[in-house]
C-alpha cells in the first residue's frame, strides 16, 4: 500500500503498559503465598510472568513495525499451522492435561496453548475473507456459510480439549467481525437461535457444565464444590469496600481462592485495592477499547478495519466474561483477564495483538 506511515498511537502504548504493570504487581501479590508453599519461592509466578511480559513487549514493538497487510498474505499459512497444533495437542504424550482439559503443548520448562494463538490467526484470516468478499456477506450461502465454516471447525477442535471459554471468545469475536462487515440481521437471528440450541446441547452433554450453570444461579447450593470459587471470589470482593484492605493484604489468597493469580486475579485486586482500584482497571480497559475503535474507524482499507475490530472485540469479550465470572454475574468459564492474569500464551498473544493494532494506527486517519 502506498500510504504515508505516521507514529503509532502513543496513548494505546501507555495504557497497555499500565495494564501490564498492574498485572505484574497483582500476579506477585496474589501468588506469593501459593508460590512459597508449592515452590519455596514467593517470586516463582512473578518471575515467569515477567519473562512472558518481556517477550510479549518485544514482540509487540516488533510487530508494531510490520505492515499489517503482511498478515493478510500469511493468514492462510498461520491458520493452517494453528489447526495442526490443535490436532497435536489432542495426542497423548504431546498435549498436556490440566484441570481436565488437554490444551497445552510442553516446550521445555514452559508450555504453549494453541487455542490462544488460533484466536489471533482466525482474526487475521477472517479479516482477509471479509475484506475480499464484503459484497457477498449478505448472502447466507455464498458469503456467510464459508466464513462460519472455518470458525466452527476451529470451535469444534477446541471443544475436543475441551475449552468452552476460549472457544466462546473466538466465536464471539468472529461473529462481531461478521456483523460489522454488513451481514443481514435476519441471518444473525437465525444463527442466534441455533447457537442457543447448540449451547444447551453442550451443557446437557457434559454434567460438569450443567453443575457450573446451577452453581452460578445459586453457588450456596453446593458451597464446597461447584459453588466454591464464586463464593470465595465474592468473599474477596466484599471486604474490599471503597479503598481495599491494602496492597498485599488479601485474605482470600491464603488458600481460600484456588490459584488466585489466574482467572480470579480481579477478585484479589478488588479485595486489596477496593472499588477505586477495580474501577481504575476497568477505566484503563475502556480507554484501550476506545482507542481501538478509533483506529478501526480510521483504517485506510477494509482489511485494517476488520483486523482492528477483531482484536478489540477479542479483548472486550474476554474482559466482560472474566469480570462477569469474578463478580458472580456469569458461570465459571476459565477465561483469563487480558494483561493481568498469569499465563504465558494468553499474555504473549494479547501483546502481539496490540502490536498489530498499533501498526494499523500508524496508517489510520483519526
Image: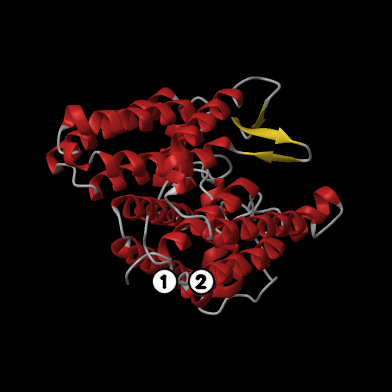
Mark 2 packing: few (<14 Cα in 10 Å), some, or many (20+)? Answer: some
Residue at point 61% right, 55% down? 59
Residue 279 makes an appearance in the image? no
Question: Against 203, is 344 above or below?
Answer: below
Please state which of residues 219 and 125 is positioned toward the viewer in this rendering: 125
Give x and y (percent) for residue 354.
50, 59
Visible residue check, residue 216: yes
273 horizontally vs 70: left or right: right
Q: Which residue is mark 2?
A: 15
- Please provide percent x and percent y for residue 286: 40, 68
Tell me the residue at 60%/38% (across/down).
Answer: 113
Name the residue beneath numbered marker 1. 287
Left/right placement of residue 189 relative to residue 348 reads: left
Q: How many other residues sit within 10 Å of disc 1, few (<14), some (14-19) or many (≥20)?
A: some
Q: Quadrant of residue 63?
A: bottom right
Gap between marks 2 and 1, in whole Å? Answer: 8 Å
- Nearer to the camera, 136 or 215: 136
Amino acid at each position: 500500500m502506498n500510504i504515508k506511515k505516521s507514529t503509532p498511537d502513543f496513548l494505546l502504548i501507555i495504557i497497555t503498559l499500565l495494564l501490564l504493570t498492574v498485572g505484574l504487581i497483582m500476579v506477585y501479590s496474589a501468588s506469593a503465598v501459593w508460590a512459597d508453599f508449592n515452590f519455596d519461592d514467593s517470586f516463582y509466578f512473578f518471575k515467569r510472568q515477567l519473562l512472558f511480559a518481556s517477550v510479549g513487549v518485544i514482540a509487540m514493538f516488533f510487530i508494531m513495525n510490520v505492515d499489517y497487510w503482511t498478515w493478510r498474505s500469511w493468514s492462510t499459512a498461520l491458520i493452517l499451522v494453528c489447526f495442526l497444533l490443535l490436532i497435536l495437542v489432542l495426542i497423548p504424550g504431546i498435549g498436556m492435561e490440566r484441570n481436565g482439559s488437554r490444551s497445552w503443548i510442553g516446550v521445555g520448562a514452559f508450555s504453549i496453548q494453541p487455542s490462544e494463538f488460533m484466536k489471533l490467526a482466525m482474526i487475521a484470516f477472517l479479516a482477509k475473507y471479509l475484506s475480499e468478499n464484503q459484497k457477498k456477506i449478505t448472502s447466507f450461502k455464498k458469503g456467510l456459510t464459508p466464513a462460519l465454516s472455518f470458525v466452527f471447525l476451529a470451535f469444534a477442535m477446541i471443544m475436543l480439549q475441551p475449552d468452552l471459554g476460549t472457544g466462546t471468545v473466538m466465536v464471539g469475536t468472529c461473529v462481531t467481525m461478521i456483523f460489522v462487515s454488513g451481514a443481514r440481521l435476519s441471518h444473525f437471528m437465525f444463527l442466534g437461535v441455533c447457537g442457543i440450541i447448540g449451547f444447551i446441547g453442550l451443557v446437557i452433554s457434559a454434567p460438569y457444565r450443567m453443575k457450573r450453570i446451577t452453581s452460578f444461579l445459586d453457588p450456596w447450593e453446593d458451597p464446597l464444590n461447584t459453588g466454591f470459587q464464586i463464593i470465595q471470589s465474592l468473599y474477596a470482593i466484599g471486604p474490599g469496600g471503597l479503598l481495599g484492605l491494602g496492597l498485599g493484604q488479601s485474605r482470600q489468597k491464603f488458600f481460600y481462592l484456588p490459584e488466585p493469580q489466574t482467572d480470579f486475579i480481579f477478585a484479589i485486586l478488588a479485595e486489596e485495592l477496593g472499588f477505586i482500584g477495580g474501577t481504575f482497571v476497568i477505566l484503563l480497559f475502556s480507554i484501550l477499547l476506545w482507542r481501538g475503535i478509533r483506529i478501526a474507524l480510521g483504517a485506510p482499507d477494509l482489511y485494517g478495519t476488520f483486523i482492528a475490530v477483531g482484536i478489540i472485540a477479542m479483548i472486550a469479550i474476554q474482559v466482560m466474561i472474566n469480570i462477569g465470572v469474578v463478580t458472580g454475574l456469569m458461570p465459571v468459564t476459565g477465561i483469563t483477564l487480558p494483561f493481568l492474569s498469569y499465563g504465558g500464551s494468553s499474555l504473549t498473544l494479547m501483546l502481539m495483538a496490540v502490536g498489530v493494532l498499533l501498526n494499523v494506527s500508524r496508517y489510520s486517519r483519526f
